[in-house]
Image: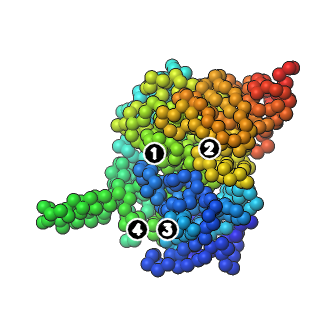
Amino acid sequence: MIRKYTFGSPADTGAVVQSIPAEAGDLPFFSVSFPEGGEPGTVAFTLNLNPEDILWGLGETLRGMNKRGGRYRSWNVDETQHTDDRQNIYASHNLLVVFGPGRLFAVYLDDPGLVTWDLGFTRSDQAVITSANGDLNLYLLEEESLNELARSFRRLTGRSYLPPRWAFGYIQSRWGYASEEDIRTVVAEHRKRHIPLDGVCMDIDYMDGFRNFTWNRGTFPDLKGLNADLRRDHVRLIPIIDAGVKLEEGYAAYDSGVREDAFCKKADGSLFVAAVWPGRCCFPDFLNPEARAWFGDQYRPLLEAGVEGFWNDMNEPSLFYSDEGLAECFSVLDARKEGAGDAEIMGALRSALGSLANSPEDYRRFYHRVGDRLIRHDKVHNLYGAGMTRATAEGLRRFGPEKRWLLFSRSSFVGAHRYGGLWQGDNISWWQHLKLALQMLPNMNLCGFLFCGCDLGGFAGDTTEDLLARFLQLGVFTPLMRNHSAIHTRDQEIYRFSTWEKMRDTVTVRYALLPFLYSEFMKAALSDGLYFRPLAFDWSDDPRACRVEDQLLLGESCMIAPVLEPNALGRSVYLPEDMLMIRFRSAVDYDLIPLEKGDHYVELALHEFPLFVRKNRIVLLCPGGESAETLDDTRLTALGWIPDGAAYDFYRDDGTDPSPSPDQITRITAAAGPSLRRSFTAPKDFPECRIPDPAE
């Protein structure tokens, strides 16, 4: 059951696809108040919390899976310091699930402005959700189970984005690949060492002066030829696109944007200008359909050069400074000149310079046109990255409606999950960010973002050999598996390390599992289900399972529990039921260990990692390969604890159809028998097939 309650005059965010009439009665569970001292119209929703209540949701936020006890802000910002004292980072997803004895419901605030979530921070027995705008639609969802609640929210907001199958391959990325030679070297080093690879991301280095939709003709003289060469080797180029468009007459994107009236403006009708990587930039008005259409068409030169995937960045939008902000900063500094010798000058300097980037004042300086309305940006701030994702996706569909495209973004809002994936932002090479990456995943899935993953190894800082190894082990199971790092940090391509062969072996497990993981992803997306979820979603009556914060269910068959600490040679695991542990070292070297329900300490050397398979379920492995396109998904090995027989519904399509049918299922049935491992060959046309008994 879904009920809708309207407050103020909400903007249409595009997040909700169901038409639900607003209720006239009181809002259940919450008390509603209008606090003084905030923005006009501020509204607060207060929920009394029971001692055992668990709170999930909020998508890409910090702290653990259970959000209780924290304070959070829905306000998209470019923030690399992902520490517990940060209340917000790149994305805002306003879904909160409340689960406790005798109650289960979710609340979604369709509000694109600033929302604060005090979830037991001020008072441990209260959650207070405050909308600064007071203009929102609030949706209350109630279902009988956690999994059905997740499906109900997906039906409310629409089906998750479907990437091409090749996008499940390993992707290598670095800010610093500045030439065609750099790209070719990366691919060659992977191929000669037989490290599987399907994509190479290009950061801003490939652009001409950091201008969107251009490339440097000196360092990339033949981008189309480079693309063609890499495609023959089953590798795709994936360029970055930023939100800001350089203000420069004679630059095609700027000139056409001005002609099409596609940029955001200030109250006086002049263009809003702020500095980003290219210098002073204008910002497309992604809330305007005509501006979205214009922006989506700007990708055409790169598409004509053979590009099949993009990653969108700096789209919170991230602002280094505005002209107005810089002038105000200098005025503060000028005012302090006479007192340069006193103790206050350092504070004045820090305050003036530190407030330049992503200033709240700048976000109040410009407007969006929505129909006949002008809406100040800060009132709809969190929609900006989602609008860029939508504009890109619609442009890609116009160019190539017959296929799926790879697209993932840094900033987002609910609704963008229909158009593209999401990476978890610019993390750091810290062990705590490895754990954070795991803990973000189920909450991002709850909000619709199934195609997601982190920067493996860490983006900022210098990774270590053991940290990269453990990041890769998590990445084996995340839909987006990308190794990405920042310029001026340690090179962290796998082949740079002394244990590269063992890291390569980890990546081979991803490719052996790729058809199975793709199957689990597609079934979840097409059924409005979850790819990752907390253990409580399947064992809601098990108090221990409900509190697990470092293990995740994956699809219908599996549980993951990676090692998340340095120098560890194993970890403790809680099993809510009997499971089979597969301890992987490579795609062909693994142990099968049946484990009974309960607590276990499992030994895991640095280059070993586990996958747990539920009883009477099956995991499929295919023979190794170095690209997604060259895998043979008819020669399969079934792994599982199947003494009583088991069946698996294997989803299999061409990996490119933009409108795939959920019925493309092959039922694979295992004959009863004592074996934990059985190999078989399925027919090319894949009718229903049977895994033979070991004795046959």
Residue 562 at what x, y percent from top left?
A: 58, 38
**What label sits on residue 364 in the rendered view?**
4
**Hey, what amino acid is under mark 3?**
Thr
Q: CA distance from mark 1 to mark 4?
A: 28 Å
Image height of 109 relative to 303, above or below: below
**What label sits on residue 362 in the rendered view?**
none
Image height of 109 relative to 466, above or below: below
**What label sits on residue 122 in the rendered view?**
3
Q: CA distance from mark 4 to mark 2?
A: 42 Å
Disc nearer the start of the sequence (3/2): 3
Kindly check if marks 1 and 4 are in contact, taking CB atoms under 8 A apart as contact: no
Where the C terminus falls, by quadrant? top right
Q: Nearer the viewer, mark 1 or mark 2?
A: 2
Q: CA distance from mark 3 to mark 1?
A: 28 Å
**Hey, what amino acid is under mark 1?**
Asn
Q: Assign a secondary structure to mark 1.
A: loop
Kindly check if marks 3 and 1 are in contact, taking CB atoms under 8 A apart as contact: no
**What label sits on residue 551 in the rendered view?**
2
List the residue tagged with mark 1. 427
